[in-house]
Amino acid sequence: MSTRMKAEDVKRVANLARIRLTDEEITKYTNDLNDIVEYAETLKCVDISGVQPMVSPLTVAIPLRQDVAQPSLGQKATLQAASQTKNGHFKVPRTIGEG
Amino acid sequence: MDIINLSLPALKKALDDKVLSSLELLEHYLKRIDKYDPQVKAYLHVNTEAARAESKRYDDKRAKGETVPSCAGIPVGLKDLLVTQDMPTTCASKMLEGYYSPFDATVVKNMKALGYIMLGKLNMDQFAMGSSGETSYYQKTCNPWDLSRVPGGSSSGSAAAMAARLAPITIGSDTGGSIRQPAGFCGVTGFKPTYGRVSRYGAVGYASSLDQVGPIAKSAEDVAFIMDALAGRDPLDPTSIVEKPASYVGNLSADLRGMKLGLPDTYLTEHVAPKVKEAVLAALEVYKKLGAEIIDIKMHNVDFGIAVYQIIANAEASSNLAKFDGIEFGHRADTTVLEEVYSSSRGEGFGSEVKKRLILGTYMLQKEQYEEYYVRAMKLRSLIRQEYDKAFSQCDAIIGPTSSTAAFTFGANRSAFEMYLNDLYTVLLNLNGSCGISIPCGFDEFGMPIGLQLQGDMFADQKVLNIAHAFQQATDYHKALPALIEGGL
Amino acid sequence: MRYETVIGLEVHVQLNTKSKAFCSCSTEFGAEPNSHVCPVCMGLPGSLPVLNAASAEKAVLAGLALGCNIQKVSCFDRKNYFYPDLPKAYQISQMYMPVCLGGGVTIESEDGQTKTINLTRIHIEEDAGKLVHGEGADAEFSFVDLNRSSIPLIEIVSEPELRSASDARLYMQKLRTILLYADVSDCNMEEGSMRCDANISIRPVGQEKFGTRVEIKNMNSFRNVQRAIEYEAKRQEQVLSEGGTIRQETRLWDNNNNITLPMRSKEDAEDYRYYPDPDVLPLVLDDKFINDMKARLPELPDSRRKRFMEDYGLPLDDADLLVSDIKYASYYEEAVKAHNSPKMVANWVMGEVLRVVNDKNCGIYDTNISPASIGELVALIESNKISGKQAKEVFALAVESGKTPATIVKESGMEQVSDTGALEAIVQKVIDESPAESARYRAGEVKLQGFFVGQIMKASQGKANPKLVNDILKKLLS
């Protein structure tokens, strides 16, 4: 059977999902998530050999759009919902590494 | 005039014949919202002034004899995950408090073009994650049949507003039962169209391969009526692939001769409340009288449906909701550290259920888990599709309960796992992608409505609507009103 | 111990479509920040991606030009990570089923050897936005411009078959030439429309097993690709020779100090949680689509070079230079079409025309002198209408004025007098006016020929054809 998720596992995954959790949340989620993961374990009993994965209910090909440029939102509308902007840009704390 | 019980076609006729003005119709619903919504708490935003101006505009045009769009003046309530330009869109989350979209969802645009009046935005489970309506950041919508009970979810506001007749029609969305289950709990008719039938453009995504926008209405006839506005190919949604059919309401038929309804051997088990089972069995009798044949079919994948659904829905959600990082829009935490812009904005902005599901989805997609969980779930989804294909080669629709119980009281279902079991009979259809409807078929011992679910094949939307319509032509369950609003306005 | 360098390159190429990969925003370079942005490429709630047909077409064109197997079904996946230049927090890419598999690039190594570097795959993906780092009061901040967000890219991944830094540079240059032929990108490394990441490891010569590889990013010119790889290979040798071990990591090329610097180690590497994008259905290409793309593809450099040598009798070096840019090659062929003198035309194109291209830093078609004019100019020389020296003047005037060589020659009266009758008259006149010199010449003082030619050129205002003058002079004085 599966290894149960521990608090630090939940913390690590929450970090990967970029979600800060309180200690209470971590405790609560650890229990809830283990219930679900345990249930998901039951799937391992089903024989799936030779079965193709189904990604979408549709079995058609992607419809393509013709390569024609259309007007964009414009700088003002693009930035209107952002909480921090400057000189036509979205503003964030400094990043390191590649530009 | 008995405005709240008029069908949409009758409403349209009354407006066309000028027996009723758009503004009168709107004011009637605004008054009802004033009176009942403080108890039901279905609306997050009522579009009073803009709706008045728009209704008046249509009335003026009609008075001058000018042509108006075919559905001019019919108000419609929207689940708050359909983005709108002139009303806020919050997904019932702190994350999007006060957010205005620079564009209208395609379904909103289409309805506006036909003259529908946007009445307001309806409460929901936060980001459509929940099946009781309780995860909204703003308010808990109550079940109009018993205010101490949940309306179901995630389209809680859409179903409750419909049940309390706080709109002539509402729009919801269904990822794992989010239209059908609350419709069942609230004694109204809720339809999940076939995946690809209605544009998802502008419906904030939960799980892209499962989500579908659809109506909650008084009847299958009204569903058919508004589906004529909702359905159709949208060049902005690459998965909305089908051209608009002629007319659902025009082709509505109650003739069930030769129809076969399949009852799965796994549907009426001990999980189902006795009253629910009773109501479903009674419905089977109604259908037999209407000339349909009931056949037994085998559906064994119910056993793992919830788990497959949990993996796929949450995995997709974990990346669909990654865009909520506080940079371009939405809640941004007060910090000067880049990593905290992400983690604190998301930690503060998302509600507990959302965070839990995103973490679960992230867990499932990790390199070490991907094959074991996600790929396996996608394969099992294929098996579910195969089982449905086989079933629909034997019958025209699958019949059964929408949920195992009627609406429960707030806080009754405690464990997360039990909450997810609410979706037991609805999630499989989303995994398959085909259409389904929940229609009222009785009441339990507490007087709460019971939902009957009819599931159809891919693009068999008309057929499912016809089968539901036939039932409603023969029964009155869908006409029953909650005591709360009986004899009121 | 002697080491061998093992290099694999991942090259990102921005496709030159008019609109972005998954929305209709313009891809134009250099616009105001955040002015080519819409709900889709900024990841607003409710938006959905719709694939641009041209992204698929250009990816297939690139694949065909590079000899890849075009996959009739390819799929799009999400690469999940959080960074301010990635508004959806996932990049749409093709991880599991890319549009092209296999293929290769043939290079002429510096030692003269011909090598084919095999490709692993080519896949379609979308670009990220651009980050600008603040200065002064804004030094604590970075600024996001999403104009580049979702511009279509292809990533071309080579097998680890390159063995030297110079081969890597030659591979990049050849790749660029081919992609320009296929017209899928402008391949401008400085503007970032062609970017290269290198995976580098070293191993003792003769050893089968690969060493630990290091990824180098941020090399924005062919020269830097070579320098960065040279540096990194030496650095790794140094580490091993000192008894150290190579860490699997990502390093940045520092262009100012000519070194590579550590960026992140493998332990910090993000788990990208690739999974099939449920919003983007599989790309399905039928035979017609692939055949249409084959028909759109021009003759490619290797085959064109062969043809230039065979049909025009050009030496390898000439053919090499002329096919190095599809525009050079077509310019040359248009000029030859105007006047069929392949070698002479080649000399003019490679000499004078490319000099202007370099001086003006412009395209070969922007030099103000057309291929037809080059043909005309060579024709004027070969029919003795003008001398080679005059031709250079005519060329300069043509570049300056945009006029055709024939017009210039006519307007400036530069045309050589090659009419024998007219020339005889001039020569006779000069002889008649110089009786003493004529007598001395006839008496055997042959060196006076120079005097006569000078006088004749003077009388003809420099237009007499010198070769004809000599012949006529000899005849009339004999």
Image: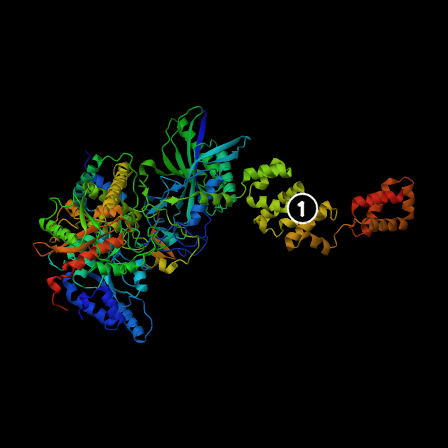
Q: Quadrant of the C terminus of chain C?
A: top right
Q: Position of residue C48 (x, y in %)?
A: 34, 52
Q: Against C258, is B253 above or below?
A: below
Residue placed at 55% from the left, 37% from the top? C302
> Dot 1: few (<14), some (14–19), or many (≥20) neighbours within 10 Å?
many
Q: Position of residue A43 (x, y in %)?
A: 21, 37
Q: Nearer the viewer, residue C264 or B425?
A: B425
Q: Quadrant of the N terminus of chain C?
A: top left
In the image, is C369 to the left or to the right of B251? Answer: right
Q: Is residue B150 something that shows in the picture?
A: no
Q: Which residue is mark 1?
A: C339
Q: Against C409, is C106 above or below?
A: above
In the image, is C446 to the left or to the right of B119? Answer: right
Question: Is disc 1 placed on a helix, strand or loop?
Answer: loop
Q: Against B445, is B37 above or below?
A: below
Q: Position of residue B296 (x, y in %)?
A: 17, 44
Q: Chain of mark 1?
A: C
Q: Position of residue C147 (x, y in %)?
A: 41, 53
The total number of labels drawn is 1
| Residue furthest left as drawn | B445
